[in-house]
Amino acid sequence: MGVPIEGEPIQIHSYKHNGHIHRIWDETTILKGTQNLIIGGNDRTIVTESDGRTWVTREPAICYFHSQQWFNVIGMLREDGIHYYCNLSSPFIYDGEALKYIDYDLDIKIFPDMTFNLLDEDEYERHRQEMKYPEVIDRILKTQVTQLIHWIRQRKGPFAPDFVDLWYERYLTYRS
C-alpha cells in the first residue's frame, strides 16, 4: 500500500460490502499521508453517486482516515461552527489510484455543540441481511460505534478543539 503525497489531489472511493461503488469524491488535497493516517481537505468538490448523479459539496471539509479504525470523520466548516459526519467503515487503503474504504451504513452526525445522533440503523440492518455481513464485522462495527462516541465525548483525535481549524489553515496554503 502506497502513501499519497502531501499537497497532491486524490480521489476518495467509497464501496459497499458487496464490492459495488457507493460514492466518489473527485478531488481531495492530501494534508498528511502516512501508512496509518490520511488527512485531506476539499471544498466544492464533485461527488458522484453510484447511480451516476453528481452534486458538489457546499463547504470546506477536513477528512480524517485511520488504518486502524473502522470509521472515518469529515469535519465541515459552516457559518455556525464545525459539523462532523462520521461513517462507520472499513479501515482505508490507498492503492495509488484513490483512497478506498467500505461504507457500512451507520453514521454519526455531530453538531457544533458536540451533541450527536446515530443515523441509518435501519439501513445498516437491511444491508447486513442483504449483503450477509459476517458476524465478526457486526461485532467490530458495534464496538467502533462505542469507541467513536467515546472519542466525541472526550474531544479526542479529529474532535479535538483546534483539529479542523489547524488542518484547514494548512489546506488554504495549497489553495493559494
Image (spheres, helix red, strand yellow):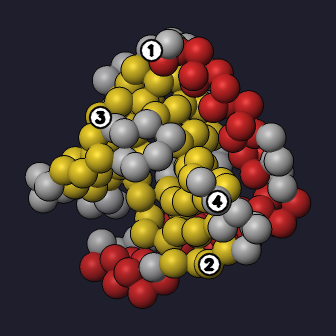
Between 84 and 34, the residue placed more toward the observer is 84
Q: Judge depth for marks 4 and 2 and give the one in front.
A: 4
Which quadrant holds residue 94? top left
Cβ atoms at labels 2 and 3 below 8 Å apart: no
Q: How far apart are marks 4 and 1 (CA)?
A: 30 Å
| Residue 151, horizontal then vertical, whole percent | 79, 59
Tell me, for residue 117, which label it has, or none.
2
Residue type at mark 4 is Asp
Crowdedness of circle 4 by 10 Å Cα count: few (<14), some, many (20+)?
A: few
Q: Which residue lies furthest to the front in this view?
A: 79
Query: Three-letter amino acid code at disc 2?
Result: Asn
| Residue under pointer 1 | 8
Circle 4 is placed at which residue position?
Answer: 80
State the image coordinates of residue 67 (x, y, percent, origin top left): 60, 39
Sequence-first disc among 4 and 2: 4
Q: In the image, is residue 32 above or below residue 68?
A: above
Disc 3 designates what residue?
26
Residue 67 appears in the picture as rendered = no
Under circle 2, the secondary element is strand
Label 2 vs label 1: CA separation? 33 Å
Asked whether the residues under the numbered discs 4 and 1 touch, taking CB atoms below 8 Å apart as contact, a structural biologist would say no
Q: Which of marks 4 and 1 is in front?
A: 4
Dot 3 falls on a residue whose secondary structure is: strand
Label 4 or label 3, whichever comes before in sequence order: 3
In the rendering, at what x and y percent does residue 14 appear?
35, 49
10 Å neighbourhood of mark 1: few (<14), some, or many (≥20)?
few
Residue at image location 66% in from the left, 26% down from the top: 169
The earlier-in-sequence mark between 1 and 3 is 1
User: For the residue marked with disc 1, what is the amino acid?
Assistant: Glu
Question: Can you say whether 69 is above or below 122 in the image?
Answer: above
